[in-house]
Amino acid sequence: MNFKGFFKNILNTKRATKEPLMKKFLIVGLGNIGEKYTNTRHNIGFRILDELAKTKQVEFETEKLGDVATFRFKGRTFILLKPNTYMNLSGKAVKFWMQKEKVSIDNLLVITDDLNIDFGTIRVKGKGSDGGHNGLKDIQDKLVTTKYPRFRFGVGSNFSKGRQVDYVLGDWSAEEESKLIERLPKSIEVVLSFGTQGLANTMNNFNGK
Protein backbone atom coordinates (compact mmCIF):
# COMPACT_ATOMS: atom_id res chain seq x y z
CA MET A 1 0.00 0.00 0.00
CA ASN A 2 1.38 3.43 -0.91
CA PHE A 3 1.48 6.33 1.56
CA LYS A 4 -1.51 7.99 -0.09
CA GLY A 5 -3.63 4.90 0.43
CA PHE A 6 -2.30 4.47 3.95
CA PHE A 7 -3.34 7.96 5.04
CA LYS A 8 -6.68 7.61 3.27
CA ASN A 9 -7.41 4.52 5.36
CA ILE A 10 -6.51 6.37 8.55
CA LEU A 11 -8.84 9.23 7.62
CA ASN A 12 -11.68 6.83 6.86
CA THR A 13 -11.16 5.08 10.21
CA LYS A 14 -11.35 8.40 12.07
CA ARG A 15 -14.54 9.30 10.23
CA ALA A 16 -16.04 5.92 11.04
CA THR A 17 -15.46 6.49 14.75
CA LYS A 18 -16.79 10.06 14.76
CA GLU A 19 -19.83 9.84 12.53
CA PRO A 20 -21.83 7.40 14.68
CA LEU A 21 -21.46 9.78 17.62
CA MET A 22 -22.66 12.69 15.54
CA LYS A 23 -25.65 10.65 14.40
CA LYS A 24 -26.65 9.47 17.87
CA PHE A 25 -29.42 11.33 19.69
CA LEU A 26 -30.65 11.08 23.28
CA ILE A 27 -34.34 11.91 23.55
CA VAL A 28 -35.45 12.34 27.15
CA GLY A 29 -39.11 12.43 28.13
CA LEU A 30 -39.71 13.83 31.60
CA GLY A 31 -42.27 12.37 33.95
CA ASN A 32 -42.88 10.52 37.20
CA ILE A 33 -42.88 6.74 37.52
CA GLY A 34 -45.89 4.91 38.91
CA GLU A 35 -49.37 4.11 37.67
CA LYS A 36 -50.98 7.08 39.43
CA TYR A 37 -48.93 9.48 37.28
CA THR A 38 -49.44 7.75 33.94
CA ASN A 39 -52.20 9.99 32.57
CA THR A 40 -51.15 13.25 34.21
CA ARG A 41 -50.20 16.42 32.36
CA HIS A 42 -46.77 16.37 34.00
CA ASN A 43 -46.03 13.06 32.25
CA ILE A 44 -46.42 14.26 28.67
CA GLY A 45 -42.72 13.51 28.09
CA PHE A 46 -43.28 9.84 28.93
CA ARG A 47 -46.46 9.82 26.85
CA ILE A 48 -44.75 11.11 23.71
CA LEU A 49 -41.89 8.62 24.02
CA ASP A 50 -44.32 5.75 24.58
CA GLU A 51 -46.16 6.70 21.40
CA LEU A 52 -42.90 7.04 19.46
CA ALA A 53 -41.66 3.64 20.66
CA LYS A 54 -44.97 2.09 19.67
CA THR A 55 -44.74 3.65 16.20
CA LYS A 56 -41.21 2.33 15.73
CA GLN A 57 -42.14 -1.06 17.21
CA VAL A 58 -39.53 -1.01 19.95
CA GLU A 59 -39.98 -1.73 23.64
CA PHE A 60 -38.54 -0.05 26.71
CA GLU A 61 -36.28 -2.00 29.00
CA THR A 62 -35.48 -0.98 32.55
CA GLU A 63 -31.81 -0.09 32.88
CA LYS A 64 -29.77 2.10 35.19
CA LEU A 65 -31.68 5.27 36.15
CA GLY A 66 -34.42 4.78 33.58
CA ASP A 67 -36.37 2.88 30.95
CA VAL A 68 -34.60 2.89 27.59
CA ALA A 69 -35.54 2.02 24.00
CA THR A 70 -33.46 2.45 20.84
CA PHE A 71 -34.23 2.56 17.13
CA ARG A 72 -32.61 3.61 13.86
CA PHE A 73 -34.19 6.11 11.46
CA LYS A 74 -32.62 7.58 8.32
CA GLY A 75 -29.12 6.63 9.41
CA ARG A 76 -29.55 8.07 12.90
CA THR A 77 -29.73 6.27 16.23
CA PHE A 78 -32.42 7.49 18.59
CA ILE A 79 -32.05 6.55 22.26
CA LEU A 80 -35.29 7.15 24.16
CA LEU A 81 -34.97 7.65 27.91
CA LYS A 82 -37.68 7.84 30.56
CA PRO A 83 -35.84 8.57 33.84
CA ASN A 84 -37.03 6.53 36.82
CA THR A 85 -35.57 9.01 39.31
CA TYR A 86 -38.82 10.99 39.58
CA MET A 87 -39.14 14.39 37.98
CA ASN A 88 -37.10 16.42 40.48
CA LEU A 89 -33.97 14.29 39.99
CA SER A 90 -34.11 13.95 36.20
CA GLY A 91 -30.66 15.46 35.71
CA LYS A 92 -28.87 12.48 37.21
CA ALA A 93 -30.30 10.13 34.58
CA VAL A 94 -29.72 12.59 31.73
CA LYS A 95 -26.07 13.11 32.63
CA PHE A 96 -25.43 9.38 33.09
CA TRP A 97 -26.89 8.39 29.71
CA MET A 98 -25.20 11.24 27.87
CA GLN A 99 -21.87 10.01 29.20
CA LYS A 100 -22.64 6.33 28.69
CA GLU A 101 -23.70 6.78 25.06
CA LYS A 102 -21.23 9.61 24.38
CA VAL A 103 -24.00 11.92 23.17
CA SER A 104 -23.11 15.58 22.77
CA ILE A 105 -25.31 18.20 24.39
CA ASP A 106 -26.35 19.42 20.93
CA ASN A 107 -27.85 15.97 20.29
CA LEU A 108 -29.86 15.94 23.52
CA LEU A 109 -33.57 16.76 23.38
CA VAL A 110 -35.60 17.03 26.59
CA ILE A 111 -39.40 16.80 26.31
CA THR A 112 -41.43 18.44 29.04
CA ASP A 113 -44.79 20.00 29.88
CA ASP A 114 -45.20 23.77 29.94
CA LEU A 115 -47.87 25.71 31.82
CA ASN A 116 -47.03 28.96 30.07
CA ILE A 117 -48.24 27.96 26.60
CA ASP A 118 -51.64 26.84 25.38
CA PHE A 119 -52.60 23.19 25.37
CA GLY A 120 -51.04 21.24 22.52
CA THR A 121 -48.79 24.09 21.36
CA ILE A 122 -45.25 23.07 20.47
CA ARG A 123 -42.19 25.11 21.33
CA VAL A 124 -38.66 23.87 20.56
CA LYS A 125 -35.67 25.90 21.78
CA GLY A 126 -31.92 25.44 21.99
CA LYS A 127 -31.59 27.03 25.41
CA GLY A 128 -33.58 28.80 28.10
CA SER A 129 -34.40 28.99 31.78
CA ASP A 130 -36.07 26.23 33.73
CA GLY A 131 -39.26 28.31 33.86
CA GLY A 132 -39.99 27.01 37.35
CA HIS A 133 -40.00 23.40 36.13
CA ASN A 134 -38.18 21.22 38.67
CA GLY A 135 -37.16 18.61 36.10
CA LEU A 136 -35.48 21.20 33.90
CA LYS A 137 -33.94 22.84 36.95
CA ASP A 138 -32.23 19.60 37.98
CA ILE A 139 -30.99 18.96 34.44
CA GLN A 140 -29.58 22.49 34.35
CA ASP A 141 -27.84 21.92 37.69
CA LYS A 142 -26.34 18.56 36.67
CA LEU A 143 -25.20 19.70 33.20
CA VAL A 144 -24.11 23.10 34.54
CA THR A 145 -25.69 24.90 31.60
CA THR A 146 -29.02 26.17 30.30
CA LYS A 147 -27.88 25.64 26.71
CA TYR A 148 -29.42 22.34 25.75
CA PRO A 149 -32.33 21.66 23.33
CA ARG A 150 -35.77 21.22 24.82
CA PHE A 151 -39.21 20.50 23.44
CA ARG A 152 -41.97 22.08 25.50
CA PHE A 153 -45.49 20.75 25.06
CA GLY A 154 -48.15 23.20 26.20
CA VAL A 155 -50.57 21.96 28.86
CA GLY A 156 -52.28 25.31 29.39
CA SER A 157 -52.99 27.06 32.68
CA ASN A 158 -56.65 26.36 33.34
CA PHE A 159 -56.34 26.32 37.12
CA SER A 160 -57.22 28.64 39.96
CA LYS A 161 -54.66 30.41 42.14
CA GLY A 162 -52.64 28.05 44.28
CA ARG A 163 -53.75 24.96 42.36
CA GLN A 164 -50.79 24.67 39.97
CA VAL A 165 -49.42 21.45 41.47
CA ASP A 166 -52.85 19.79 41.45
CA TYR A 167 -53.26 20.81 37.83
CA VAL A 168 -49.98 19.41 36.47
CA LEU A 169 -50.34 16.25 38.54
CA GLY A 170 -53.97 15.90 37.50
CA ASP A 171 -55.23 13.65 34.72
CA TRP A 172 -56.01 14.99 31.26
CA SER A 173 -59.64 15.98 30.77
CA ALA A 174 -61.75 14.00 28.32
CA GLU A 175 -61.53 16.90 25.83
CA GLU A 176 -57.75 17.06 26.16
CA GLU A 177 -57.45 13.32 25.66
CA SER A 178 -59.40 13.52 22.41
CA LYS A 179 -57.14 16.30 21.14
CA LEU A 180 -53.99 14.44 22.16
CA ILE A 181 -54.81 11.89 19.48
CA GLU A 182 -53.97 14.64 16.98
CA ARG A 183 -51.05 16.19 18.86
CA LEU A 184 -49.06 13.04 19.63
CA PRO A 185 -48.27 12.24 15.96
CA LYS A 186 -47.15 15.84 15.49
CA SER A 187 -44.91 15.51 18.52
CA ILE A 188 -43.32 12.40 17.02
CA GLU A 189 -42.61 14.39 13.87
CA VAL A 190 -40.82 16.98 16.01
CA VAL A 191 -38.50 14.39 17.55
CA LEU A 192 -37.65 12.77 14.23
CA SER A 193 -37.11 16.16 12.62
CA PHE A 194 -34.69 17.13 15.39
CA GLY A 195 -32.55 14.11 14.62
CA THR A 196 -32.70 14.33 10.83
CA GLN A 197 -33.24 18.02 10.01
CA GLY A 198 -31.54 19.71 12.95
CA LEU A 199 -32.64 22.11 15.65
CA ALA A 200 -33.03 25.26 13.52
CA ASN A 201 -35.20 23.60 10.87
CA THR A 202 -37.30 21.91 13.53
CA MET A 203 -37.92 25.22 15.27
CA ASN A 204 -38.90 26.88 12.01
CA ASN A 205 -41.21 24.07 10.95
CA PHE A 206 -43.00 23.27 14.21
CA ASN A 207 -42.90 26.12 16.73
CA GLY A 208 -46.34 27.48 17.49
CA LYS A 209 -48.09 24.70 15.59
Image: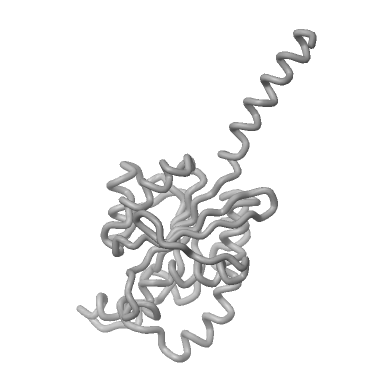
Residue 20 position within the rendered picture, expressed as x and y whole percent measured from the top left: 60, 39
Q: Picture quarter containing residue 36?
A: bottom left
Say if 185 sits above or below 22 in the image: below
- Quarter placement of the C terminus: bottom right
Residue at image x 60%, y 52%?
Answer: 195
The residue sitting at the top extreme is 3
Q: Specify whether residue 140 is in view.
A: yes
Work out whether residue 58 or residue 22 is closer to the camera in this orientation and state it: 58
Question: With respect to residue 28, does 153 lie above or below?
Answer: below
Is 12 left or right of 158, judged from the image as shown?
A: right
Give the left or right position of residue 35, taking residue 209 as reference: left
Residue drawn at (47%, 44%) of the image: 101
Residue 26's spot in the image, x, y percent? 49, 51
Indicate the quadrant containing the N terminus: top left, top right, bottom left or bottom right.
top right
Q: Position of residue 52 (x, y in %)?
A: 56, 67
- The front one of 81 and 111 is 81
Residue 52, placed above or below residue 64? below
Q: Residue at x 55, y 75 (%)?
A: 183
- 157 and 103: which is toward the camera: 103
Q: x, y (%) of residue 17?
A: 60, 32
Residue at the extreme bottom of the image, as rendered: 174
Q: Is residue 5 above or below residue 35?
A: above
Is residue 132 among the parts visible in the rendering?
A: no
Residue shown at 67%/19% (left/top)? 10
